[in-house]
Image: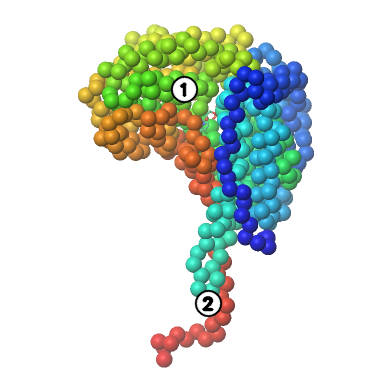
Amino acid sequence: MGKGFYEVPVAVNEPVMGYAPGSAEREEVLATYKKMYHSRIDVPMFINGKEVETGDTGNMAPPHDHQHSLGVYHKADQSLVQEAIDTALEARKKWSKMPWEQRAGIFLRAAELIAGPYRAKINAATMLAQSKTVHQAEIDAACELIDFLRFNVQFMTEIYAEQPESTSGAWNRLEYRPLEGFIYAITPFNFTAISGNLPASAALMGNVVVWKPSDSQVYSAKVIMDVFREAGVPAGVINMVMGDPVMITETVLASPDFSGLHFTGSTNVFKDLWKKIGTQIHTYKTYPRIVGETGGKDFIVAHPTSNPKQVATAITRGAFEFQGQKCSAASRCYIPASMWNEVEGYLKADLASISMGSPEDLNNFVTAVIHEGSFDKLASFIDQAKSDSDAQIIAGGNYDKSKGYFIEPTVIKTDNPKYTTMCTELFGPVVTIYVYPDNQWSETLQLVDETGEYALTGAVFSEDRYALEEAVQALENAAGNFYINDKPTGAVVGQQPFGGARGSGTNDKAGSKLNLYRWISPRMVKETFVTPTDYRYPFLG
Ligand code: NAD
């Protein structure tokens, strides 16, 4: 350990840049976007600090321009996955003994690299790879990732400071060891910040990691690896492998040294992973930690006393920003009959003013969905709603994949509160509205609670405190992140720790101390100063 009780810089949230016309940051990010768009790159894997190319490649294309290639990424075979595991375990010998202030220094440096020299690059990469508008890229790839890195360093020191009582005769020390083995991080396409945080949070606590990013996010994942390397993450501590998720996962989970899964993605994939780990439990040297943040079917429920304009704005932003591809996106809404006409009017006016297209054109609020599989799935739900008698499309409903995977922001109204799009996670710019009778507030809250398998985010709008309090209680288990008079998206690290329960995950709250506790295995050390030499107690005479 070090030679002092060091204090780390107090974590503060990274200010969000505005990208207004004429601003320097707007010019820089657009110039970077253009340059990256016109260059083709090879994304290697990173194993033991080395760039590994296999020649077995996958194409990378912007979702809004799928015929344009940004280059290729290289895929692993089983032996390379095994090499990543072996290399991580070798790196563990030194990394797990590294004083915490050195680990802190590395990840604080990574935060500053993203805040400064890498900001335009990581944002432009996220605009290209995941079709985020510049604002969505800024709040994710730059700000949220910087926040994760800075706050986690502070949280780590707060955890280390939590120590048991000691007496004059004995000194009790809790040592927050990393887990014995290695961590497997699997990350989703939709947040560059999550992609960086899942390996980094475990590594910060002294663990070594095999990281598998999503095929659809490899392009921006490469920038993260470049930042980690420049920040000084030693060889082998975070190894990035790409390729067949089933093969990679089977190889990883077959290792006796597998000691934790840090997953974010869809519910069924996570349940399957849990099952595989359970089936192979006798293989492992230690009980693996299993952390998974998964799907959502997030709600907005409005009381008759709420403000219709506020409700409509929350639906527009909550359902359609980043094409509804946030796990927290509003996708089922419950609106009282007396308010519906007004909310509908505002919502349609909002949608009429929204333009859709490439994120390079900063007038666009909506861009493309991530890939053809997602496009086809969304189109089929929209088509079904067009033909179902208990659903009606009241806005949007068009789609076109000729150039990019564009789905028009779509509002479905249904008379059936259990209609398929009220229950199923679609992960796209489609929101479903159920209009309820004003006098059925309590029944509607029960409906909200009992619909679907998820419990990630939800929002209640009301100007009546009694109605609000009733909702807070009735929906206690319906959301891990619950919003009052606000949209259900936009959680900020350090302010709203994020995660849901039920089918939405293990609720280990990314961006808080609670998550970091999962990557440590404390050792209690008791040191006795004057050690007894006689077994007899006084009562024996
Ligand atoms: P996904 O489940 O398709 O993929 C996530 C990761 O799992 C990817 O790296 C993918 O390659 C991998 N994967 C896929 N099949 C696998 C398998 N059989 N074995 C092992 N790994 C496999 O999810 P996605 O489309 O990338 O992301 C969207 C999903 O993530 C949505 O369900 C969303 O709600 C969820 N999500 C949740 C949170 C949260 O905090 N709760 C945050 C972001 C995204």
Three-letter amino acid code at disc 2?
A: Gly
- The reply to whether dot 1 and dot 2 touch (C-beta < 8 Å) is no
Q: Which residue is drawn at 51% across and 27% down?
A: 326
Residue 404 left/right relative to 429 = right
Q: Residue at x 61, y 23 (%)?
A: 19
Residue at the far bottom: name it.
541
Say whether residue 135 is visible: yes
> 11 or 270, which is in the foreground?
11
Q: What element carries label 1?
A: helix
Read off the residue under disc 1.
Answer: 317
> 144 or 174, which is in the foreground?
144
- Give the image location of residue 223, x and y in percent: 70, 32
Q: In which quarter of the image is the C terminus?
A: bottom left
Q: Which-is-in-front pick, marks 1 and 2?
A: 1
- Give the image location of residue 103, x and y in percent: 67, 50
Three-letter amino acid code at disc 1?
A: Arg
- Give the image location of residue 368, x and y in percent: 57, 16
Q: In this view, does 207 lie above or below 368?
A: below
Dot 2 surroundings within 10 Å: few (below 14), some, or many (20 or more)?
few
- Give the image location of residue 191, x and y in percent: 57, 30
Query: Residue 411's mark?
Result: none
Say whether residue 474 is visible: no
Q: Which residue is drawn at 51% across and 22% down?
A: 321
**Does ligand 1 reach within 8 Å of label 2's beta carbon?**
no
Query: Residue 169's mark?
Result: 2
Q: Quadrant of the N terminus?
A: bottom right
Residue 126 left/right relative to 158 = right
